[in-house]
Amino acid sequence: MAFLWFLLGLMIGLGVLSWYHIQLTRQLQFLMSSLQPQGSRRSLVSVLRLRQAVAASVDAQEALLTDLETWRHLSLAAPIGILQVDEENQLIWCNAQAGQLLSIQPPTAPTRRLLLELVRSYELDQLIEQTRVLRKPCQSDWTFHPVCADPSQLSRQMPRPLRAHSLPLRDGCVGVFLESRQEAVLLAQQRDRWISDVAHELKTPLTSIRLVAETLQIRLEPPLRDWIDRLLNETIRLSSLVQDLLDLSQLEANPHPSLRCKTVDLTRLIQSAWFGLEPLARNKQLRLDYVGPDRLLIQLDESRIHRVLLNLLDNAIKYSPPQQAIRVQASLITNDRSDPNLSKQLVQLDVIDAGLGFPSDALPYVFDRFYRADPSRSRSPAEVEISKTYAVGKNTAAANSASSDDAQSTKGTHAVSVSSGSGLGLAIVRQIVEAHHGSVQASNHPETHGGWLQVFLPLQRDDA
């Protein structure tokens, strides 16, 4: 009996075990059916790609960190100054060259200080603010005067001509590149001094040659007189060039005290300058188209502004095609320009011709010495002859009509009435205008497509 109960229990246990096995088998088959072989391969491929992307990202991050460290070393060792300020004009960092140019120590402490506290340069501060407002790169040139708290070091803190290039960064930050222009300024000064010395040395022998040529001119017969005439014309041309160089040197060395300002009618002065150049204009059948008030009183040095008008009109005549008009516009404007050095009330003088205009790449250099945008555009011999004849006649008329005081003030300015294609006419214009606390700029007129020279002069001198 007990054996039968044993067999019954064994059978029941085997049945329960078989049922449980069948259930596990079904669940295993269901799981296997849900995991298809294709999906398994895709999952493995995705995991493999993810691991490769992570490895590539780690390598790229390490490469970026290496490049960042390289650029950091290059910035610190760069021969130009580099500095960065935040949105509040606080100095973030600067390299050693910037610290040397601005006489400051590169910041090491975590606390930041205003750049204006470290560097007393309002020009640099204004450049940074201009870059932040305009959101575009800007450039500025100025002379930096270092401030030293140690009185024993004052003699060593010499003014430094600097040039700064700024560019906007994100979050209101601004980066600035600084370079010293000391070497360029010294070279320019040496060049100008050498040119001035040569001009002084040439003035005396040229005067002697001219006197000899004028003496022989009245004593020789016509076959030989032609050679003397050519010699005299070339001597006058060289004397004009020498006088231009001497005038430039005088204006650059001591511009303001040499001015003899008084109230002058600018309209009358324009008409007088055009009348003096009328032989050149008549040769090309050019006419003057003046637009402006009939009377415009302004404080200026009459002889020097007369020289400015002669050079501007001569330049317009030189490059205007025949039978065209040269437009001269004079008007009173309010100084809404960004230049704080100009007076509030300005006289704007525009000289517009109908020529080919200035090449776009030559516009920044048209007021430089000896610069001519197109060397092939020189005067014809006939124009040179008319110019020289006019120069001699005008000098004689000016000597007869000027008073003793005016003759003394105009000495050295009316000796040469027009430029002779040497590339000094517009350079003299800029020097004279800047001596009057004005400005001059060149562009191409949108209507005539010719040269457009604009002169801005203060209506009344602030120091008058």
Image (cartoon, helix red, strand yellow):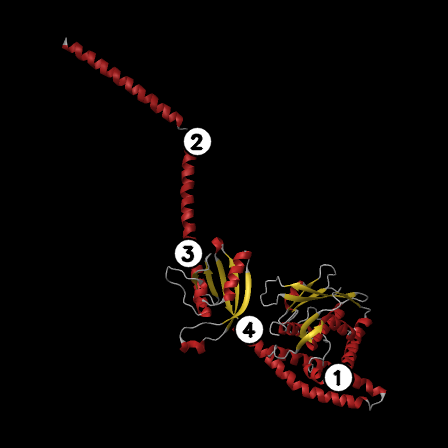
The mark that comes first in sequence, 2 or 4, is 2
123 left or right, relative to 105:
right
The residue lying toward the viewer, choosing from 58 and 167, is: 167
Q: How many residues crowd around disc 1 within 10 Å: few (fewer than 14), some, or many (20 or more)?
A: some
**Is label 3 in a helix, a strand or a loop?**
helix
Question: Quadrant of the rendered structure where residue 248 is?
Answer: bottom right
Residue 234: image location, x then y, percent: 74, 82
165 left or right, relative to 262:
left
Residue 261: image location, x then y, percent: 66, 76
Nearer the camera: disc 1 or disc 3: 1
Mark 3 highlights which residue? 66
- Disc sitting over residue 184 in the figure: 4
Q: Residue furthest top?
A: 1
The mark that comes first in sequence, 3 or 4, is 3
The mark that comes first in sequence, 1 or 3, is 3
Cα–Cα gap, marks 3 and 4: 37 Å
**Is label 2 in a helix, a strand or a loop?**
helix
- Cβ atoms under marks 2 and 4 closer than 8 Å: no
Question: Quadrant of the rendered structure where residue 2 is?
Answer: top left
**Is label 4 in a helix, a strand or a loop?**
helix
Nearer the camera: disc 3 or disc 4: 4
Cα–Cα gap, marks 2 and 4: 74 Å
- Disc sitting over residue 42 in the figure: none
Query: What residue type is disc 1 on?
Result: Ala
The mark that comes first in sequence, 3 or 2, is 2
Question: Quadrant of the rendered structure where residue 314 is?
Answer: bottom right
Q: How many residues crowd around disc 4 within 10 Å: few (fewer than 14), some, or many (20 or more)?
A: few
- Cβ atoms under marks 1 and 2 closer than 8 Å: no
Query: What residue type is disc 4 on?
Result: Ala
- Cβ atoms under marks 3 and 4 closer than 8 Å: no
Cα–Cα gap, marks 1 and 3: 76 Å
